[in-house]
Image (spheres, rainbow, N blue to C red):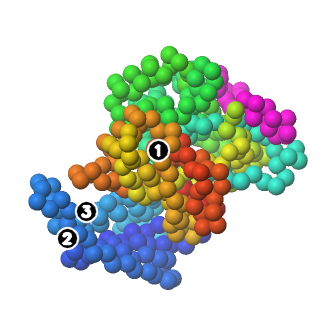
Amino acid sequence: MKTKLYAKATSGKTKFLELEVAGDYLITRWGYIDGKQQETKELCEGKNTGKVNATTAHEQAVLEYERKIKKKTDEGYVDENIWIATIIGTPTSGALPTKQDEMPNFANLQKHFCPCKPIAKPPKDCLTGKYLADRKFNGVNLIWTRDADGKHHIYTRRIEDITDNIIWMPEFKWNMNKMPNNSMVLLEFTYLTNLSIEEPEQLRGLINSRRSLKDVKKHYDNIIQNGFIMPVIFDVMFWDNMFMGNTPFIERRKLLNREFIRFVALCNDFNQKEINSGKISNWEGFILRKKDGLLEYTMNGKAKRSGSWKWKFEETDDFIVRMAEKGKGKNAKYFARFNLIQYNKKGYIIDCGYCGPGKLKVAELEELYKERSDANGDYKIMPFLVVEVLYRTRTKDGKLEFPVLQRIRDDKKPEECIYG
């Protein structure tokens, strides 16, 4: 049993991944075509011995083989037949996208579509009057499209289609007819209490694609009694079938302000006065952009960092939970101790240490344990769980000091959890 997959690296080179099941072993080979190739050989073990769902070592190898194929296909890899059809100039349906500016499918956004991300640290000249600033909301990034037939679609940054969960909300209906067909805007989906305090953890009950629409509407009705939903539109990527990324940022913002009724992000010159105002208002920070800044996207599952910068009052970042253990005392029934990891820029795993349940409420811990515990009550690592953590500083080897778990990030991809 063997499968070979191909993809384009951001450098333009062709990379491959070959998976093979040989008895109880899963063999993985990877590298670049005409370049150095690597191989690992993993001996799999049977699970749940004596139970109805027991598996042999060979069956576990096959399950892991199938899981990896699905994961890499979602990231933009394609099989050999599609790859050959692409490179000889006879692309088939689903052929590998190789161009930076290939037009996405607005009706069914591809898993490997990625808008560029803000750079983690602000530029050194950020206070020289060259930059514009939006408030950095502590919410969930969403991608909102309208296809050629005039139908609206809403996706998370992980390209999960959550249209049914969201599209009925009046906060979106106000602006639906303002967007022409074949258009895409980027927005931050936020929830604020009546005292204007951000509570992003409330959004999980709205964007979780596993929840029924009945549960989503019930949660919505509960939270708007004490606050309000605010979808903040901060950029436009396509408009009336035209790519807008090559249009200067200030012109893209003028288009948004002209076309939409409300909820377009406020944009001001970035200076010390804005910083002081943000601190007084208890904001998380700012997103900075140059007036002539452009916008990028990729079709290979990797988000570039360009065009904007983060300026935060406190350090927060996103991490993958590699391992979770039950807590003690009142948390003895749930996962309450989490081992965190990130990738470095070369793609290797960095151990970032441990943190407790932080700001997660009992109901969230109960739901997390229900979702993540296997038949033995142990933590299931797949699919990867991403969390946001607040911390004071980091050691030289990347471990966090005084970490506080802020929330679960269902909208974040694990490959976005990069250190440095």
Q: Is 169 or 333 nearer to us in this picture?
A: 333
Q: Residue at x 55, y 73 (%)?
A: 13
Identity of the residue furthest to the right in this view: 128
How would you rate the neighbour count of disc 1 (Cα within 10 Å): few for under 14, some for 14-19, many for 20 or more?
Answer: many
Q: Amino acid at mark 1?
A: Pro
- Label 1, on which residue? 357
- Mark 2 or mark 3: whose residue is earlier in sequence: 2
User: Where does the magenta region start and end?
Assistant: 254-281
Q: In the rendered view, does 177 fall on the left or right side of 16?
A: right
Q: Secondary structure at mark 2?
A: helix
Q: In the image, which is nearer the foreground, mark 2 or mark 1?
A: 1
Residue at the location (33% across, 54% down)? 380
Residue with the mark numbered 3: 63
Q: Position of residue 322 (x, y in %)?
A: 43, 58
Q: Residue at x 43, y 40 (%)?
A: 161
Describe residue 128's horizontal placement relative to residue 369 as left or right.
Answer: right
Mark closest to the chain's N terminus, 3 or 1: 3
Real-space CA distance between mark 3 and mark 1, rounded to the nearest whole angstrom = 31 Å
SS of the residue under disc 3: helix
The image position of residue 8, as x and y in percent, is 51, 67
Q: Is residue 107 left or right of residue 254?
A: left
Looking at numbered disc 3 in the image, what kind of residue is underneath it?
A: Leu
Q: Which residue is located at x 58 percent, y 26 percent? A: 192
Rendered view: 15 above or below 272:
below
